[in-house]
Image (spheres, helix red, strand yellow):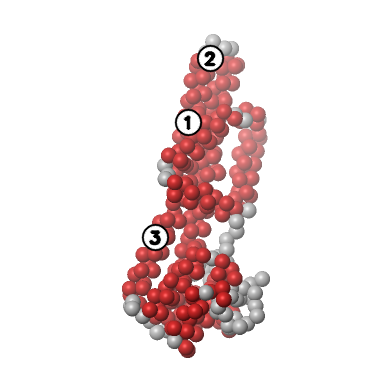
Amino acid sequence: MFIIIGYIIVTASILGGYAMVGGHLGALYQPSELVIIGGAGVGALFVGNNGKALKKTLKSLPTLFRGSNYTKQHYLSLMSLLFNIMSKSRQQGMLSIEKDIESPEESELFNQYPKLIADVLLMHFLTDYLRLMISGNMSALEIESLMDEEIETYEHESDVPAQSIAAVGDALPAFGIVAAVMGVVHALASADRPPAELGELIAHAMVGTFLGILLSYGFVSPLATVLRQKSAEKIKMLQCIKVTLLANLHGYAPQVAVEFGRKVLYTSERPAFTELEDFVRNNKPGARTSEGGEE
């Protein structure tokens, strides 16, 4: 939604300002320039990425126009789930949660949080490390090191679409210059025309430079920033799980462990201490709520 609003503001500001000084909007309509710049940008995207990177980039584009799933309510649900898991393992032993992590959809601990279950990345990360904790063959230091490696791997992998889009955005001004040069070549080749027509051809050629810069900084490059922000939200979720589970491994009570997790969250989504405490208290296993209190 914000992307669409931003595009409207960019377009209205530039065209409005151009019209205010008496510019003719029709002169900016140059389909051939768009074909050159847009086609070259898409071609560069294909040249600069392998099949896996292209697939991941194209798959990430629809997510740009969706709102964030990682809200305060989502984190409250996550920490409530972690609290319930740690409480059960502390009271009944680590083996008591084995069935829960093998079949989360059928687990009383998990099935109160359908949105969390639907998050494949979250569930794989959480259940994998709970299995390692159950095995008892790895120390807290070893698990922490493995978590860091996995988070770093995901961070690099999730940055591929942003890098691909950013590279295209950086190239568009140059492609705009290419389009402008080709237009100038065409104008010079038509030097025998009247000065008015020649001036019009040169003006059309200059539109290529304008479009290249506008498309780069007003439309394409900002998308890379949005992709990186969305990636950072997912990484923050993994860090929250990591810190909470490690605090539990170091012997802290579940109430304290979830406080460790709360502290690593961004302040815009971080619940207050009492807010988290009340939420956890009201969402014990067996409580008949929807997504841990989410509407």
Q: Earlier in the sequence, mark 2 or mark 1?
A: 1
Q: Amino acid at mark 3?
A: Thr
For the residues marked 3 and 2, what is the alpha-carbon distance in whole angstroms?
Answer: 56 Å
The numbered disc on residue 177 is 1
Q: Earlier in the sequence, mark 1 or mark 3?
A: 3
Residue at the disc numbered 2: 190
Q: Is residue 292 left or right of residue 177?
A: right
Q: Is residue 182 above or below residue 16?
A: above
Residue at the disc numbered 3: 153
Q: Position of residue 68 (x, y in %)?
A: 57, 61
Residue sitting farthest toward the bottom: 91
Q: Position of residue 213 (x, y in %)?
A: 51, 37
Per the image, label 3 sits on a secondary structure element best described as helix
| Residue 148, quarter of the rendered image | bottom left
The numbered disc on residue 44 is none
Q: Position of residue 199 (x, y in %)?
A: 57, 19
For the residues marked 2 and 1, what is the alpha-carbon distance in whole angstroms?
Answer: 20 Å
State which mark lies toward you, 3 or 2.
3
x 44%, y 87%: residue = 93
x 49%, y 64%: residue = 121
Relative to the observer, which residue lies in front, 206 or 101?
101
- Crowd band around label 3 with a 10 angstrom C-alpha radius: few (<14), some (14–19), many (20+): few
Relative to the observer, which residue lies in front, 68 or 176?
68
x 57%, y 14%: residue = 195
For the image shown, how many numbered marks are present on the structure? Answer: 3
x 47%, y 31%: residue = 177
Q: Is residue 231 above or below residue 186?
A: below
- Crowd band around label 2 with a 10 angstrom C-alpha radius: few (<14), some (14–19), many (20+): few
Q: Do tag 3 and tag 2 residues touch (Cβ < 8 Å)?
A: no
Q: Is residue 100 above or below residue 238?
A: below
- Crowd band around label 1 with a 10 angstrom C-alpha radius: few (<14), some (14–19), many (20+): many
